[in-house]
Structures are given as structure tokens and as C-alpha cells.
Amino acid sequence: MAFASSFAKGSLLDIGCGTKPYKQLFLHAITSYIGIDARNRHADIKKDFLTASIKPSSYDTVLSTQVIEHVSDPVLFIKKIHTILRKHGVLILTAPLVAALHEEPYDYYRFTKHALKQLLEKEKFEVLLIKEEGNWISSNITMTAFHLELIANRFFLKYPKKLFIALLMMLGNILSCLPKNITKPKLYPMNYLVVAKKK
């Protein structure tokens, strides 16, 4: 995400901001940072993005991290982002390709890079980059860790399980440094980072 901050400018709206974990990474590049989230007390605007009244052409940058998969109408979501961005405004968006079901029942979609590109270009965005994050090793290890979190929760297994998960994730980080012809990040990414500009 630090890499993506180089594309940010001016006033930034963080959609589904949660606790604003990325705020510090963007402050050097922008003039203001506003978070919108209906379900988090840290938000500046405590409303749902799709139903909130936001003035058109009022932001230079929109940040949306791991939100679009929870939106029941992603086309409407991208249309509204386009509306509130100023001309040549920037959208920085992340979306998972591989993830366990979460925040149910509000977990609707998984997107390939082709779907994200098509969705954005149809709504008059120029896609500047799509960056794959993760690979087949990290995808499999992360899904295994998710599964282990759900099982073996009896007291005498809970803490050994946490240690095993930590070791598993460390192993994944080490193995992910193998050459790309082995890890295949383009075929098996966990996640996509997309930067697009309003035409």
C-alpha cells in the first residue's frame, strides 16, 4: 500500500475505512483524509457509502481496500466513485481473488484482474496498473491458516495452534521469495491492487 500512496493527491476519501490503518501511509501525499464507514466509530462519516449524500467532483483520490467484494452492486459502487472524483482523480482499490468467506452474509464476489479492468473501463476509468499480490504458496498457506483458526479451539490446543499458524505464515513468507517461475504470482495471486484514473 505504501507503493500505491505515490499515486494519491489532494483530498482523499477512504471508503470502508475501518480503523484507518493506511492513513499514515498517505498523509505525505494528500491535503486531507476523510474516512467513511457505517460500522466503525473511527470514521469521519458514519454512513453507508452508497446511500450517503456526497457532492459530485469533491475528491481527488478515493481509497477502497477489501470493500468491493462486500458490495451487492459493484457497478453502482464504481459509478458513484466516478461521480465523486474530480477530473483525472485517482482510484486506489484492492480486491481479493482468494479468501475464505468472511463478514457473512455480506460477502458477495471475488474478482479476477480481467473483471476489474472491464468494470473500471466501462465506467470511464483509465486503468494505470493492476498489481498481483501473493502467489500459489501464500494463497495455500493463508487459506490453511484461516481454516486452522476455525478449529482446534479447546484450551489445550488453542495456543499451540497459534504458534503453529505463526510458523506457517513465516514459512510462507520465506517460500514466497522463490523465483516467480516457481511461485506463479500472475496465475495464483491472493489479491489485486488497482490504480485507475477518471477520464
Image (cartoon, helix red, strand yellow):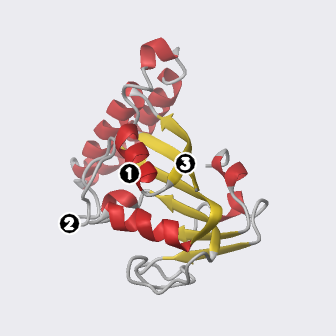
| Residue wearing tag 1 | 119
Disc 2 element:
loop
Say which quadrant the C terminus sits in: bottom right
Q: Amino acid at mark 2?
A: Pro
Residue drawn at (50%, 65%) of the image: 82
Displayed quadrant of residue 28: bottom right
Q: Which mark is residue 84?
A: none
Look at the image and tell me whether residue 15 can be seen. Answer: no
> Residues under labels 2 and 3: Cα distance?
32 Å
Q: Residue 105: x and y, percent? A: 20, 66
Foreground mark, 2 or 3, reads: 3
What's the residue type where badge 1 is placed? Leu
In depth, the one of 123 and 48 nearer the eye is: 123
The residue carrying mark 3 is 126
Q: Who's the residue at 43% across and 77% down the image?
A: 49
Tell me the tag on residue 105.
2
How many residues crowd mark 1 within 10 Å: few (<14), some (14–19), many (20+)?
A: some
Label 1: which secondary element: helix
Residue 183: quadrant of the picture: top left
